[in-house]
């Protein structure tokens, strides 16, 4: 049987936490760590290998781009981290330059894997990766609003005193300031719930601004995004057809095209198999268009 192989490029706080999460959950046979700071990747690989007597079998090593050969999934978390007070969009130009070189290197050794993008601004980095790679759109996936939707479900669950796994609610659009809550479809076990406008507004602003809050408190966010990336990896490797709010290229989605945004997608071994056609109301549609326009404007700035 073919061994499953995952490459993580950029083992800073997000990349190393993601690698460790994948390892703890025995998601793959081989795990390659790559970073511009080679020592960091070597140190992380050593550290993780020393845990093998407690974990079982997986081969982990600090590698080079050649090791992208045969990788099922290449996760890219390389880039500059968002600094306190810095918007995600401020990071854009720095990260596009980093991606130019990374994608060029990956393509030399891998042409049929899946690119899973987490670097911010993630929707634009995913769009750029898709264009640069020339890969079919199903094989270039951004983490999108999966983390935001998890934060949203957690906060709703806290308010209703319900396990967040039983709360179904979507954040769609940009992973960032212009994202929107789909209140019209939020439910617990298929049953709608009602919250005051004030509570809704508080839950949504705490969702949208969570990264700023965490960065102010400890400098970076990494545990929950690592779990979100693990969730996407699992849906792919296990061919789950799971519905996850990842970023994909939209083609007349409620009238929005030619931009990557987080929307509910069916994720399986091919990557994004299909975008789920959810019914949103007119107000939500207008907000989705606003989010798309905002991202298109940013894309124009870096072109
Ligand atoms: P970090 O600074 O800790 O790590 C970035 C790593 O990338 C560093 O180790 C650095 O050496 C490496 N790197 C830089 N240039 C490289 C290159 N050319 N090749 C290989 N490696 C390179 O940052 P972090 O906290 O791990 O965050 C990483 C990214 O993830 C940021 O863009 C951050 O905003 C983003 N992020 C996204 C989400 C999400 O929901 N998508 C959540 C949290 C963080």
Image (cartoon, rainbow, N blue to C red):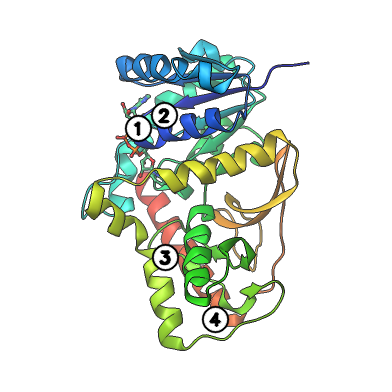
Mark 2 or 3: in front is 3
Residue 86 in view of the camera? no
Q: Which mark is residue 97?
A: 1
Query: Which residue does the numbered mark 2 point to in the structure image?
Result: 100
Q: Residues within 10 Å of mark 2 (few under 14, many from 20)?
A: some
Residue 179 percent across, percent down from the top left: 46, 65
Verify CB contact (< 8 Å) between mark 1 and mark 2: yes
Query: Which residue does the numbered mark 4 point to in the structure image?
Result: 283
Verify CB contact (< 8 Å) between mark 2 and mark 3: no
Please state which of residues 71 and 218 is positioned toward the viewer in this rendering.
Answer: 218
* N-term-proximal mark, 4 vs 3: 3
Lateral position of residue 192 relative to residue 89, left or right? right
Verify CB contact (< 8 Å) between mark 1 and mark 4: no
Image height check: is 198 above or below 73? below
Query: Which residue does the numbered mark 3 point to in the structure image?
Result: 207
Image height check: is 185 above or below 22? below
> The N terminus is located in which quarter?
top right
């Amino acid at each position: 049987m073919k061994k499953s192989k995952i490459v993580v490029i950029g083992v800073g706080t997000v990349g190393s936490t993601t690698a460790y999460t994948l390892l703890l959950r025995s998601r793959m046979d081989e795990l390659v760590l790559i970073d511009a700071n080679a020592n960091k990747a070597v140190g992380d690989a050593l550290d993780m290998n020393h845990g093998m007597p407690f974990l079982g079998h997986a081969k982990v090593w600090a590698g080079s781009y050649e090791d992208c050969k045969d990788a099922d999934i290449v996760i890219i978390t390389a880039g500059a981290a968002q600094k306190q007070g810095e918007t995600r969009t401020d990071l854009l130009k720095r990260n596009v330059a980093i991606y130019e070189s990374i994608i060029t290197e990956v393509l030399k050794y891998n042409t049929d894997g899946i690119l899973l993008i987490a670097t911010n601004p993630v929707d634009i980095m995913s769009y750029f990766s898709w264009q640069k790679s020339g890969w079919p759109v199903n094989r270039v996936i951004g983490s999108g609003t999966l983390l935001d939707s998890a934060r949203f479900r957690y906060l709703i669950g806290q308010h209703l005193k319900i396990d967040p796994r039983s709360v179904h609610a979507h954040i769609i659009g940009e992973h960032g300031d212009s994202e929107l809550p789909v209140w019209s479809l939020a439910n617990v076990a298929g049953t709608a719930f009602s919250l005051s406008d004030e509570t809704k507004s508080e839950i949504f602003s705490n969702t949208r601004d969570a990264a700023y809050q965490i960065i102010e408190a400890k400098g970076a966010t990494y545990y929950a995004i690592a779990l979100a990336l693990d969730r996407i990896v699992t849906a792919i490797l296990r061919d789950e057809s799971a519905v996850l709010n990842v970023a994909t290229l939209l083609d007349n989605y409620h009238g929005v095209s030619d931009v990557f945004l987080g929307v509910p997608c069916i994720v399986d071994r091919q990557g994004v198999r299909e975008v789920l056609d959810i019914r949103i109301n007119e107000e939500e549609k207008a907000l989705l268009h606003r989010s798309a326009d905002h991202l298109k404007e940013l894309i124009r700035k870096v072109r």
